Image (cartoon, rainbow, N blue to C red):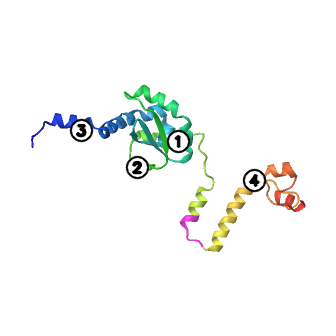
């Protein structure tokens, strides 16, 4: 067995395909936030590069779908920052794990996403959390459901026939709610 220098061993490691893809991924991670922007960076994580295809984990299938349409633009931006060429990007929720680090860049991206105009606040999140935290029987579950339904429908106009809350579209279409309209048919 002959001993080889550390320089020779490291050179052999760096020439292997797996080592090169790890180095390429590290280079890509260094510029990802700058290329895609803070809102997208908060919802994505580059996972691997295999055969010149970048695999990116997304927080939801909606993000994966939308970013698939933007992949050519992202590839063009990445090519300006990287010394190697990527042939494609694949977006998937398969390897998504929420970030658990303390990086200020990630915290900034998360904060930006919280204030993003496309984000829809869930008006019922508090009531759902309350329902999950309490152990409920059938009666309390029904009461909770009734409260949620009343909250959702309190801003709706009333049907002139049955006096139930009715979506405006039904009143414009039939002048009564869909249930009363179906009874007439």
- From the image, tell me which residue sits under label 4: 155
List x then y, in percent, for residue 160: 88, 57
Residue 43 appears in the rendering: no
Query: The residue tagged with tag 1: helix, strand or loop?
Result: helix
Q: Position of residue 93 (x, y in %)?
A: 49, 48
Mark in front: 1 vs 3: 3
| Residue 8 percent across, percent down from the top left | 17, 34
Lower position in the chain sequence, tag 3 or tag 4: 3
Sequence order check, earlier mark of 1 and 3 = 3
Q: Nearer the viewer, mark 2 or mark 4?
A: 2
Which label belongs to residue 100? 2
Q: Secondary structure at mark 2?
A: loop
- Disc nearest the viewer among 3 and 2: 3
**Frontmost residue, 119 versus 150:** 119
Q: Let me know if residue 131 appears in the view.
A: yes
Q: CA distance from mark 2 to mark 4?
A: 40 Å
Image position of 20 with respect to 138: above or below: above
Q: Are marks 1 and 3 in contact (CB under 8 Å)?
A: no
Q: Are marks 2 and 1 in contact (CB under 8 Å)?
A: no
Q: Which mark is residue 13?
A: 3
The magenta stretch spans residue 86: no
């Amino acid at each position: 067995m002959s001993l080889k220098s550390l320089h020779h061993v490291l050179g052999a490691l760096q020439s292997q395909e797996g080592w090169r893809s790890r180095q390429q991924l590290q280079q890509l991670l260094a510029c990802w936030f700058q290329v895609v922007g803070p809102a997208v960076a908060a919802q994505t994580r580059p996972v691997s590069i295999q055969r010149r295809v970048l695999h990116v984990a997304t927080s939801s299938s909606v993000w994966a779908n939308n970013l698939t349409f933007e992949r050519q633009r992202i590839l063009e931006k990445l090519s300006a920052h990287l010394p190697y060429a990527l042939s494609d990007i694949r977006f998937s929720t398969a390897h998504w794990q929420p970030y658990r680090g303390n990086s200020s860049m990630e915290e900034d991206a998360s904060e930006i996403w919280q204030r993003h105009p496309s984000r829809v606040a869930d008006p019922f999140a508090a009531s759902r959390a309350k329902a999950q935290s309490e152990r409920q029987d059938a009666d309390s579950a029904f009461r909770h459901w009734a409260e949620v339904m009343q909250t959702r429908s309190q801003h709706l106009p009333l049907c002139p026939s049955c006096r139930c809350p009715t979506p405006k579209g039904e009143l414009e279409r039939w002048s009564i709610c869909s249930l009363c309209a179906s009874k007439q048919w």
